[in-house]
Image (cartoon, helix red, strand yellow):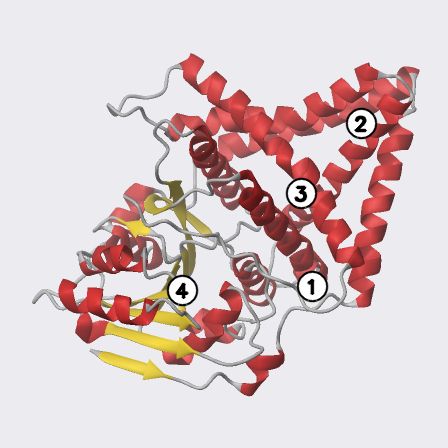
Amino acid sequence: MSVATEAVPAADAVAAAETPMHWRVLAGLLLGGGMLAGDRAAGTRGRLARAWLGAAVGAVLASALAIARAGRRPPITPAQAREHRGSSLTFTVLVAARDEAAVLPNLVGDVAMQTHREAGGQPCFELVVVDDRSTDGTGDAALSAARDAGIGGVTRVIRRDGVGLPDGKGAALTAAQPDVCKGDVIVVLDADARIGSEFLATLAGYAEAGAPAITARRRILHTEGAAMAAVQADEQTLDGELQRGRWALGGCSEFRGNGIVVRRGLLAEVGGWRAEALTEDLDLSSRIAAAQGIRVAWAIDAEVWEEPVTDWGALWRQRLRWAEGAIRRAFEHGLLVLTSSRLPLSARLDFAAYAGQLVAPALVVGGIVGSLRRGRLDVASALLGTYALLGGILSFDSLRWERTASGDRLATSQRLVRALRLSLFNGIWLGAVPGALLRMALRRGSVGYDKMPHRGAG
């Protein structure tokens, strides 16, 4: 067992995310312009209003049906991935942790149980923990758990210390750039993650089947009797449906932060981890797409479980960060993706459509405000209904993946109720995206990072 203590590179100390002035102006224009356009659209009447609404509904239905159909025929199926298991690929399981002594030993135990080993039982993996300025003994807890689980010899802890270092997972990962990792493939997990014993073996199958970039299916723990956790679980299932469909349609499918899987050489080619990335998953997705033309495979059978957010204040802060990360990614990498000669036209159009959705909440909010101001409740209802339609259709379809506690498929009535609940929950984005645009437009100085608390139960 070894402990690696490395000095943080000087560049890291000044690489905190900033909001350039032209981004602030653009964010303000998108927010104000979107709401104004929505307000004006709410004032249209007669044939023009019907044509506008009909076009919106038609586009929503066409998009939903295309994604739902494509999700059933992914480029690499679980069966095809299973044919490539038993490879000699090696993995670096990389975890960035700050004050996570309560949860990290659980994940260490899961890593120790992995079946992806040589014939003699030696692990085909290593575990690297970046202890990001923890004060609760996170690094010692990880090493102790690794020793107890029998993987002390393949476990390293890298201590990240310093004053004025940028916060966030992306910044912490810069302490373990590709040259620090030994595995052929790097797997990034959150400290509260839980994985099954076949997790790495499953990912090896996808990698050997030709996927240099993969994202695992995110699942939510503690959903029994907890409506807030249960709807977050369905939200992750819906997100998986979207990404799987985009991947199958040839679009720019993306990583999700808990379960990033990338070839070490590919990560090195695009410059490794970046401290200024507010959402490291979206940032890396766009960089490998623009530079290498590589889209992210979505592995439905490689499951990574995580704790839910348990209070509305924390949930709101998390969604604000996600929304701002998506906006910043579009501002920084959007043009590079759209003009990349490595990407087919279908992928670039998909990226444009997906990034364009960031304007939709401002349009909807502006339209609702405008319709209420004019006393036209029918328009407000139509706008909300159209916005919910896409989510509702895809939610219902994606819930075909879910099972009851006894392993049976959900009944149609159960899927309908849960799809409706999820559509209502997704209304949070009508506030989070405009809120993120407003925050970007008004912010000065470095960007803060809101870390979610973890309990470690179960």
Label whose residue precedes the other's in the sequence (4 or 3): 4
Crowd class of label 2 (few under 14; some 14 to 19; many from 20; radius 10 Å): many
Question: Callout 3: 10 Å neighbours few (<14), some, many (20+)?
Answer: many
Q: Which residue is mark 2?
A: 368
Residue 342 to residue 400: above or below: below
Query: Could one spot residue 272 in this view of the protein?
Result: yes
Which mark sits nearer the N-terminus, 2 or 4?
A: 4
Which of disc 4 and disc 1 is earlier in sequence?
4
Q: Residue at horizontal 13%, vertical 68%? A: 122
Q: Determine which residue is flagged by label 4.
A: 97
Residue 68, position as x, y percentages in the image: 51, 30
Q: Position of residue 184 (x, y in %)?
A: 33, 70
* Label 2 vs label 4, nearer the camera: 4
Return the disc, 2 or 1, that comes first in the chain's sequence. 1
Q: CA distance from mark 2 to mark 4?
A: 42 Å
**Pointer 4: residues within 10 angstroms few (<14), some, or many (20+)?**
many
Give the Cα separation between the discs numbered 2 and 1.
30 Å
Secondary element under disc 1, as helix, strand or loop, is helix
Q: Residues within 10 Å of mark 1 (few under 14, many from 20)?
A: few
User: Which of the 4 quarters of the picture holds residue 201?
Assistant: bottom left
User: Which secondary structure lies at badge 3?
Assistant: helix
Provide the residue designation for mark 1. 332
Which numbered marker is on residue 176?
Answer: none
Residue type, label 4: Ala
Q: Quadrant of residue 276?
A: bottom right
- Give how far apart the Cα atoms at labels 3 and 1 are: 20 Å
Residue in front for this viewpoint, 205 or 313: 313
Position of 381 compared to 127: left or right?
right
Q: Quadrant of the N terminus?
A: bottom left
Disc 2, SS: helix
